[in-house]
Amino acid sequence: MATRGAKPKPAALRVVDGTVRTARHGTESYQREVAENSKSSFGELKKPPGLKGEAAKAWKSYIEKASWLDASREPAAIAFCELWHEFRFNPSGFAASKHGQLRAYMSELGMTDERNRTNAGAEIKDEFFD
């Protein structure tokens, strides 16, 4: 049976996108500690040597930039890159069901939320509060 509601986010992703709620998740420092413990227990996410061509480019473009991912997400990251390679190889032959899989992997890896994208050094000024 399906479960209602959104899937729980990893602690590191909550810290990155700023959705830490102290009543639900504890303090932000606690969430950072949980994320660091998770990263230290699973290890850093490293590019597998078997990725070639467009899959390797996808890893470099998308997965390496996702600082919140740890090695526990490696299978989903590899599957995303392989699907991306297949899409780039034959876009017109890429089935609609595979588009759904690609979107699901992107969502699972936290790549569809625009709040995760940081602009290093660029600050947005608010006309009312700045």
Image (cartoon, rainbow, N blue to C red):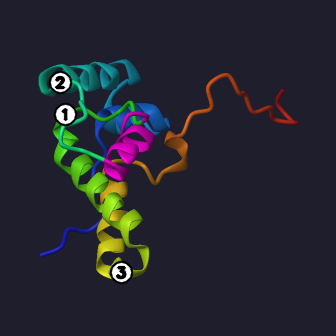
Q: CA distance from mark 1 to mark 3?
A: 31 Å
Q: CA distance from mark 2 to mark 3?
A: 37 Å
Q: Earlier in the sequence, mark 1 or mark 3?
A: 1
The answer to whether residue 126 is visible is: yes
Q: Are marks 2 and 1 in contact (CB under 8 Å)?
A: yes
- Residue drawn at x 35%, y 33% is 68
Taking 41 as reference, is 91 left or right?
right
Q: Mark 3: which amino acid? A: Gly
Locate the N terminus by quadrant: bottom left
Q: Mark 1: which amino acid? A: Ala
Q: Quadrant of residue 2?
A: bottom left
Q: Earlier in the sequence, mark 2 or mark 1?
A: 2
Q: Nearer the viewer, residue 7 or 119?
A: 119
- Residue where numbered disc 2 is placed: 43
- Residue drawn at x 33%, y 43% is 56
- Residue drawn at x 26%, y 20% is 36
Locate the C terminus by quadrant: top right
Q: Quadrant of residue 83?
A: bottom left
- Residue where numbered disc 1 is placed: 71
Residue 47 image offset from top left, x and y in percent? 25, 34
Q: Callout 2 environment at 10 Å: few (<14), some (14 to 19), or many (20+)?
A: some
Q: Is residue 128 above or below residue 38?
A: below
Tag nearer the camera, 1 or 3: 3
- Residue where numbered disc 3 is placed: 93
Q: Nearer the viewer, residue 110 or 18?
A: 110
Q: Earlier in the sequence, mark 2 or mark 3?
A: 2
The answer to whether residue 104 is visible is: no
